[in-house]
Image (tube, rainbow, N blue to C red):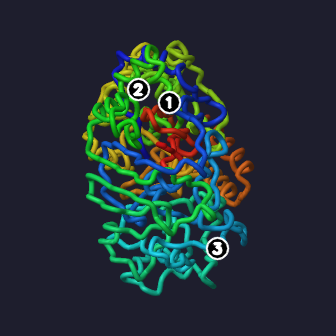
């Protein structure tokens, strides 16, 4: 789950104005694409776009290159260049891009037994980089590797979803494999789940579904040169520093029309400073004209230039990653056990100052719902505690008086100590100032980032009020609402995300009912209705959703944000 960086509050008004320079992000229709121009969303013809070298300039180093250890759904941006999976994201802007599409498989899978069994068939002509055929057994083996303790880090869902797989320790210790995954022939793979999961085609986009040839598996050293099933393969890899990719001669667009694979080479450099990345892409000298970044959004200097520099404004790609920054209540801690206190805080919040503290409306959108404003998640607009843009302190005081706090209330807000992202003291101070007008004194309690999840994620140590962030693993209401509100997901030992510690049988039953639905539109409606129902309990105070703003090189075309992650797809951009 990624978090947007906090920009200088002094730039908030400049940034808010800059938002109008590119395509706007709609709060009702999902992610919008990038702006036009030769360096923006200019059309790419997959038949004629081949050539050149794409340079990727990143802050974060690539520390893992084993598909079992990568926590990416939808294939991820860089992993998707190397690894094909049973399904993948549809790689389109807007709502269409928030859907799964067949990748290695011929379709999105055939459900049976009430969505507890999913069957897939592989396409013809699938080959690894060495020319050997990709089989269903390779897909199964790739999944089984992700259960090995020494290859930890991947998405955890299959351990919970597959029948009798919770204690499986991977093929190195248990070579008999997972019995819940069957491969009756080389092109068929069947998954047996312990409960209905209508979102299985979305999970099947995760990199742990990438095939791995058992004969080439070198355990923890496999990441030094993983065997590619995608359009590119590894030419060289220096962990946390660089990755060079070249074409996979055995990949064919005949079985993969979603990845355009335009550049001949892709060079990824890591460990750079954000300001350096943005300045290099903005200037666009030499190879930097062919540059993008997958982890660094437009910096304050560039945002301030967008109104006065139309050429730079054309080279901005905008999207929305489905994520919410919010206040989390622990109703087991006084005074938050009283819903009137929780409602009072909901009324008192000034979302304008909070959004400005996050960097302005270009990078954050005020939210009154827990689900972000994407149709694929089931978003339904509601506002049970209307505070307006600047808060409603009068209504907050009225509720506090009813709760026995007519003379005011003092509470503590826990937040991360580091202000680099949206859970730090800048956002905390904005909350503190807003609640002061309602007679609520907020004491800020910073916690070192490394220990923040340990503190808030353990029910016995969880404070009454804390700043939190949640991003979707795939575009559905399930990965948004289940971890945060399903009572069966409460983890007493730590790593708990259900911070309200809500264990409502009716909510749990509705979650089970929705999980049986395999029609995305029907599921969306139910997830949205459940979010609206949960919102009435004031268990959280949604603050803002995430907007993404990326700068792209002068020669880069096709940098259109998809509806899955709010980011352009490296497999679809061209530098020719």
Location of residue 467 by image quarter:
top left
Q: Residue 496, image x and y in percent?
A: 42, 52
Q: What is the number of the mark on residue 358?
A: 2
Q: What is the number of the mark on residue 544?
A: 1
- Judged left or right of residue 488, residue 235 is left
Q: CA distance from mark 3 to mark 1?
A: 45 Å
Residue ID for mark 3:
124
Q: Residue 54, image x and y in percent?
A: 41, 46
Q: Secondary structure at mark 3?
A: loop
Is the C-beta separation of discs 1 and 2 under 8 Å? Answer: yes
Q: Residues within 10 Å of mark 3 (few under 14, many from 20)?
A: some
Number of dots carrying numbers: 3
- Mark 2 and mark 3 lie on one chain; the one further toward the N terminus is 3
Q: Secondary structure at mark 2?
A: helix
Q: Relative to 525, say whether 181 is above or below.
A: below
Q: Relative to 307, say whether 524 is above or below.
A: below
For this orientation, the residue located farthest to the bottom is 176
Q: Residues within 10 Å of mark 2 (few under 14, many from 20)?
A: many
């Amino acid at each position: 789950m990624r978090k947007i960086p906090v920009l200088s509050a002094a730039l908030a008004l400049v940034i808010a104005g800059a938002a109008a320079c590119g395509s706007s992000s709609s709060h009702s229709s999902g992610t919008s694409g990038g702006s036009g121009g030769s360096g923006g969303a200019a059309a790419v013809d997959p038949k004629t776009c081949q050539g050149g070298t794409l340079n990727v300039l990143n802050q974060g180093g690539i520390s893992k290159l084993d598909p079992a250890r990568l926590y990416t759904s939808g294939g991820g941006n860089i992993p998707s260049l190397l690894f094909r999976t049973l399904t993948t994201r549809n790689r389109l802007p807007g709502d269409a891009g928030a859907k799964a599409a067949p990748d290695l498989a011929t379709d999105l899978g055939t459900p049976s037994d009430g969505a507890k069994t999913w069957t897939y068939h592989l396409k013809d002509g699938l080959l690894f980089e060495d020319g050997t055929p990709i089989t269903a057994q390779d897909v199964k083996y790739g999944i089984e590797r992700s259960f090995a303790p020494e290859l930890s880090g991947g998405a955890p869902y299959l351990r919970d979803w597959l029948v009798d797989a919770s204690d499986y320790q991977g093929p190195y210790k248990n070579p008999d494999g997972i019995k819940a995954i069957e491969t009756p022939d080389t092109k068929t793979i069947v998954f047996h789940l312990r409960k209905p999961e209508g979102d299985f085609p979305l999970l099947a986009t995760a990199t742990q579904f990438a095939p791995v040839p058992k004969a080439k598996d070198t355990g923890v050293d496999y990441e030094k040169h993983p065997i590619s099933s995608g359009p590119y393969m590894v030419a060289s890899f220096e962990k946390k520093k660089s990755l060079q990719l070249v074409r996979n001669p055995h990949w064919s667009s005949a079985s993969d029309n979603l990845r355009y694979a335009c550049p001949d080479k892709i060079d990824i450099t890591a460990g750079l400073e954000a300001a350096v990345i943005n300045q290099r892409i903005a200037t666009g000298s030499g190879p930097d004209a062919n540059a993008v970044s997958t982890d660094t959004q437009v910096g304050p200097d560039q945002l301030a230039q967008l109104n006065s520099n139309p050429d730079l404004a054309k080279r901005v790609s905008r999207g929305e990653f489905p994520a919410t920054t919010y206040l989390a209540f622990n109703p087991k801690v006084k005074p938050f056990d009283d819903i009137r206190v929780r409602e009072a805080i909901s009324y008192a919040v000034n979302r304008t100052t909070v959004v400005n503290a996050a960097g302005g409306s270009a990078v954050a959108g005020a939210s009154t719902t827990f689900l972000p404003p994407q149709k694929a998640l089931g978003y339904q607009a509601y506002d049970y505690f209307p505070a307006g843009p600047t808060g409603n302190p009068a209504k907050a005081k009225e509720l506090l008086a009813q709760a026995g706090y007519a003379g005011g209330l003092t509470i503590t807000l826990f937040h991360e100590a580091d202000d680099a992202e949206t859970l730090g003291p800048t956002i905390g101070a904005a909350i503190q100032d807003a609640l002061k007008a309602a007679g609520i004194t907020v004491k800020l309690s910073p916690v070192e980032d490394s220990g923040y999840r340990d503190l808030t994620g353990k029910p016995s140590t969880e404070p009454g009020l804390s700043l939190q962030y949640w991003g979707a693993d795939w575009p559905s209401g399930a990965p948004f609402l289940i971890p945060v509100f399903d009572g069966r997901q409460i983890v007493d030992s730590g790593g708990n995300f259900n911070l309200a510690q809500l264990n409502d049988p009716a909510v749990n039953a509705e979650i089970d009912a929705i999980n049986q639905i395999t029609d995305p539109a029907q599921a969306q409606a139910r997830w949205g209705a459940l979010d609206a129902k949960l919102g009435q309990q004031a268990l959280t105070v949604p603050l803002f959703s995430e907007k993404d703003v990326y700068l792209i090189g002068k020669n880069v075309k096709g940098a259109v944000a998809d509806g899955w992650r709010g980011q352009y797809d490296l497999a679809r951009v061209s530098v020719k």
